[in-house]
Every structure is written in C-alpha cells, then in structure tokens.
Amino acid sequence: MKESVNSKESVLAFERFIVSEYLRYGSVDEILRANRFKNLGVSYPGIYHILKRWGVVRSLGRASLPLTETLEFLVRAIEGKVPIQTLYRRMPPSFRPTLATVHRVYNETKKLVKQEVEIKERKRIRRVGTALVITPSWDSRQILVARDVSPAKGDIGKPYGSLSLPMGFSKMGEREKAILRVLQQEVFTGKLLESPAEFNKKALGFIDGSEPFMFIDIADVRVAVYHLELPRELSSLENFSSFKLKSFRFERVGEVLMMSQNRYLLRLGIEEIATGYLKYQERLTQATSEPFYMDSIFNRRLALLVAEEEAV
C-alpha cells in the first residue's frame, strides 16, 4: 500500500513539473528545447494529455505575419523621428540586413500598416487578445499590476520589465476560456500547480458571465478588456504568482496614469486601459454597461506616420 501511495505521489510530482515547465515556457517545443531534448519520460502527445487532465488552457502565440516581423523597426522610426540611415547605424550588431533591405522593410511596413487601418475600418482584425483589470474585494479603485519579465516583444509594445496588466493572446469568440488562460499563466500559476481542479472550479465561478467593458487595438491586436473583482480569499498579494509577471501590487488607477506622464516604463495600451476603466466606472453609475472602443496612442501614431508619408 505504501509503495502505491509513493507511486501516485511520484506521478503527481512529475505531472506538476511538466505543467510548471509549460507555464514557464509556453509551448511543448520550448519545454523540450529548455531541457535540451532530454528523454523526459513522456511523449509529445503525452504532455498534452497531462495539460488536459490539469485543465490548463493552452497558450496562444502571435501569428506569423509580415507586420509582426517589421513593426519593431517601425516603432523605432516613430519614437526616434530620425532618418532611416541614422536609425540603421544605431541598430545592435545582431541586426545585420543591408541598408537597402532596411528601406524595403520600412516601405513594406508602411504598406502593411495602411492595410491594417483599412482592415480595422472594415471591423476585421487579424489577432485578438484579452486583458484583465483585476481589483481586490475591498476597493474597485485599485488595480493589479506587475513587472513583465517574459521575453520582450517590440511588435506589441512589450519591453522587458515594463509595468503591465495580466494580458495575452486569445482566439476569436473566446471569453471565459480566454480569461482563464490569463489567470492560469499570469496571475495564479502557483494556485493552479497546487490544486488544478480546485483552482479551475473557483476561477470559473468568479469569471462566469464576464463581459468586456472595452476593446482597444494595440498594433494589429484587438484586445478585449474585462474587469474582475476577486473574492476576498484571493485578494491578498501572496496569492499571485507567475513565470511571466513579477512584483505584483495594487495601484490606484490615478497613480498608473501619473506613471505614464513621468515616462514610467509602461507596456503599450496600459495608459489607455486605465483611462478606459475610469470611464467604465463612471458609466456604471449611469447604468450604462455597453462596451466601448478606444484606439491606442501607438496606433494613432502609426496612422499619423502613414498619413505623413503619403503626403510626401
């Protein structure tokens, strides 16, 4: 009997390790790569079976689009307001295309940004995401923020170490599943690893029926933003853990907006979401609950760049 118990504990510990590695690296391929393709004692499909048993919502990555690959360069052009030749000289040694290639990339980016604007106007979007404005049970004016320590992604305005809300990619039409994915990967990773069934049941309970209060376009991603009020037993900071976000804290919305004015390192879209949340709170007092749309400052600057280039 003792051997049977030890065997079950060993299986549970192994599965917890696999789930932890998945939440850390975001894909089965990255698990294998991080472990130098060692024999982990489980097959590729076997890892997916473990994730399914634990109720883990699978990660979604960015689509492989030309816009995604070229936007980081365009961001630098906008921020620096410098000629391409000057920008080229400032690029790191790892950036080794020829200057002619850089010009082609820049022109391709302008063309694709223009296409994105047209697509948006037709109310179509290529990628979707989910962001969570999480408040504790005792104060709806404080929101959960943390430092993003996942790999930087310039194409979606996510520099390393920036202050962020919990957010990630989603599929079109997802709601509760999209919210649960973000909670598992960016807020309650430890809770999921401790007791997956208990956590998933509790999480689905307080996200049931959630509707986005706003939408915002950040680069080519349309982000649905939800407000979640945590139950009291999950509102304290020691409950929060993630491989992607660190140094969790609750900040007053006004303080977050002040950070943006002081050139604090904020992830793109956070300032607009904070502003939108204040608008949402005001609308609640007026019994108005329809979601509204905001364009990000980043996208407005992209559109302005395209307009300026078209005028030349």
Image (cartoon, rainbow, N blue to C red):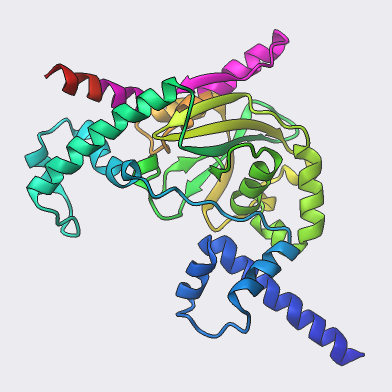
Res. 4 image quadrant: bottom right
Q: Position of residue 312 (x, y in %)?
A: 11, 19
Image-based side of 13 in relation to 248, left or right: right
Residue at the image position 48 percent from the left and 68 percent from the top:
30
Image-based side of 137 in relation to 141, left or right: right
**Outermost residue to the top:** 286
Q: Position of residue 129 (x, y in %)?
A: 53, 39
Highlighted magenta segment, given as a residue range: 275-304
Based on the picture, tell me whether residue 302 belongs to the magenta stretch: yes
Res. 74 image quadrant: top left
In the displayed structure, 165 sits above or below 296; it is below
In the displayed structure, 2 sits above or below 197; it is below
In the displayed structure, 221 sits above or below 215; it is below
Q: Is residue 45 visible?
A: yes
Based on the picture, tell me whether residue 165 belongs to the magenta stretch: no
Q: How many marks?
A: 0
Residue at the image position 40 percent from the left and 44 percent from the top:
158
Q: Quadrant of the N terminus?
A: bottom right
Q: Position of residue 22 (x, y in %)?
A: 58, 65
Q: Magenta part mainly helix, strand or loop? A: helix
Q: Position of residue 83 (x, y in %)?
A: 9, 34
Residue at the image position 48 percent from the left and 47 percent from the top:
147
Q: Which of the two residues, 168 or 112, is positioned nearer the viewer here?
A: 112
Residue at the image position 35 percent from the left and 44 percent from the top:
68
Q: Is residue 296 visible?
A: no
